[in-house]
Image: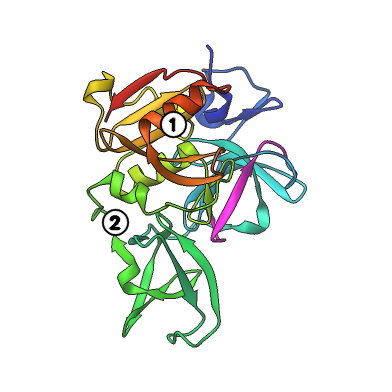
């Protein structure tokens, strides 16, 4: 069986129990459920902070730990299935199910129910939180502090226009493997916009290109996706896209035709597909 290593919890003869009978391994382990306790934590290719960041966890997102290696743990992020190494210090034992998610692009947590108290964060859109109490305009969140209540939304009450969500990231720096509001890549932007609207979405552009249905260039419009080899952008209308890209090194809004000409001239080449979700 050919399995994608990006989303298969298997390495060096160790596999998750769920793979028993599907892949060969020396030992099968039951994952230990953990939760991201930092505003964001990188999922790395190797147990080294200097190694490639392939993905990120946001605060409150679960991580299924299979094994420890030095200051890192190897496991899988259930929200998008990605596997890799995360710094153990950025994880905490699994908490109760989240009650809310961060609906603002980013927000701070305060140590006390006062905006004058010590702040931490920022916590990005789509972070998962458990609200324990409320005082005035602030809500107490387990493991974080007091967040602005209006910056949270109940789980199940999602935003409706993923193109509008993506446009809110305009100007955010480009960050390979990033999903946070302080930095993200092309597929991270698409995933963030869809998550905020309650839609499941895989992590990488080639995986996202399997979503929805193909459409013609003439049909392209708001909320549609356009793909190149290794890149994805989202339509704001028939002639305008928003995408995190290495040319601007930021999330940029620009004419689709300008992007088509520029990208065709570099290593990404021509468009591979237009798709409607």
Q: Identify the residue at image location x=38%, y=57%.
A: 97
| Residue 155, quarter of picture | bottom left
Residue 165 is at least partly visible in this image: yes
52 in relation to 109, above or below: above
Q: Secondary structure at mark 1?
A: helix
Which labelled disc corresponds to residue 114? none
Label 2 CA crowd tier, 10 Å (few <14, some 14–19, many 20+)? some
- Count residues near mark 1 (Cα–Cα under 10 Å), then give few for <14, some for 14-19, many for 20+: some
Name the residue that disc number 2 marks. 155
**Observer-nearest of 123 and 237:** 237
Q: Relative to residue 187, is residue 106 depicted above or below?
A: below
- Stretch of the chain drawn in magenta: 34-46
Q: How many marks?
A: 2
Magenta residues, dominant SS class: strand
State yes or no: discs 1 and 2 in contact (Cβ < 8 Å): no
Q: Residue furthest right?
A: 70
* Image location of residue 107, percent across then percent down: 44, 68
Q: Residue at x 48, y 73 (%)?
A: 109
Q: Which residue is mark 1?
A: 259
Q: Quadrant of residue 131?
A: bottom left
Q: Residue 22: where, in percent of width, then height? A: 52, 17
Task: Please tell me which residue lies in front, 27 or 104.
Answer: 104
**Quarter placement of the C terminus:** top left
Residue 44 part of the magenta-drawn span: yes
For the residue pair 20 and 157, the one nearer the viewer reads as: 157
Task: Label 2: state its secondary structure.
Answer: loop
How far apart in space, not on screen, are marks 1 and 2 (Cα)?
36 Å
Residue nearest the observer in this picture, 130 or 50: 50
Of pointers 1 and 2, the one earlier in the residue sequence: 2
Percent from the top left, x then y, of residue 4?
54, 22
User: Which residue is rendered at x = 36% and y = 62% of the image?
Assistant: 104
Please name the residue shown 54% across and 13% down the image.
2
């Amino acid at each position: 069986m050919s399995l994608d290593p990006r989303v298969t919890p298997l390495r060096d003869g160790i596999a998750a129990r769920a793979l028993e009978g599907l892949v060969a391994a020396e030992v099968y382990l039951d994952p230990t459920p953990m939760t991201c306790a930092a505003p964001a934590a990188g999922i790395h290719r190797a147990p080294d902070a200097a190694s490639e960041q392939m993905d990120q966890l946001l605060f409150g997102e679960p991580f299924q730990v299979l094994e420890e290696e030095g200051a890192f743990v190897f496991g899988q992020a259930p929200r998008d299935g990605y596997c890799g190494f995360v710094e153990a210090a950025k994880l905490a034992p699994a908490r109760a199910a989240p009650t809310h998610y961060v609906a603002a692009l980013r927000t701070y947590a305060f140590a006390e129910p006062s905006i004058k108290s010590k702040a931490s964060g920022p916590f990005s859109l789509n972070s998962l939180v458990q609200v324990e109490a409320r005082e005035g305009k602030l809500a107490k969140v387990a493991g974080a502090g007091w967040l602005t209540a209006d910056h949270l939304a109940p789980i199940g009450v999602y935003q409706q226009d993923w193109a509008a969500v993506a446009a809110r990231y305009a100007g955010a720096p480009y960050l390979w493997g990033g999903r946070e509001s302080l930095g993200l890549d092309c597929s991270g932007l698409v995933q963030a916009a869809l998550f905020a609207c309650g839609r499941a979405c895989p992590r990488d552009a080639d995986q996202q290109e399997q979503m929805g249905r193909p459409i013609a260039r003439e049909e392209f419009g708001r909320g549609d996706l356009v793909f190149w080899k290794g890149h994805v952008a989202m339509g704001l209308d028939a002639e305008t896209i928003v995408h995190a890209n290495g040319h601007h090194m930021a999330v940029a809004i620009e004419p689709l035709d300008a992007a088509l000409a520029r990208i065709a001239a570099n290593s990404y080449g021509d468009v591979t597909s237009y798709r409607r979700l």
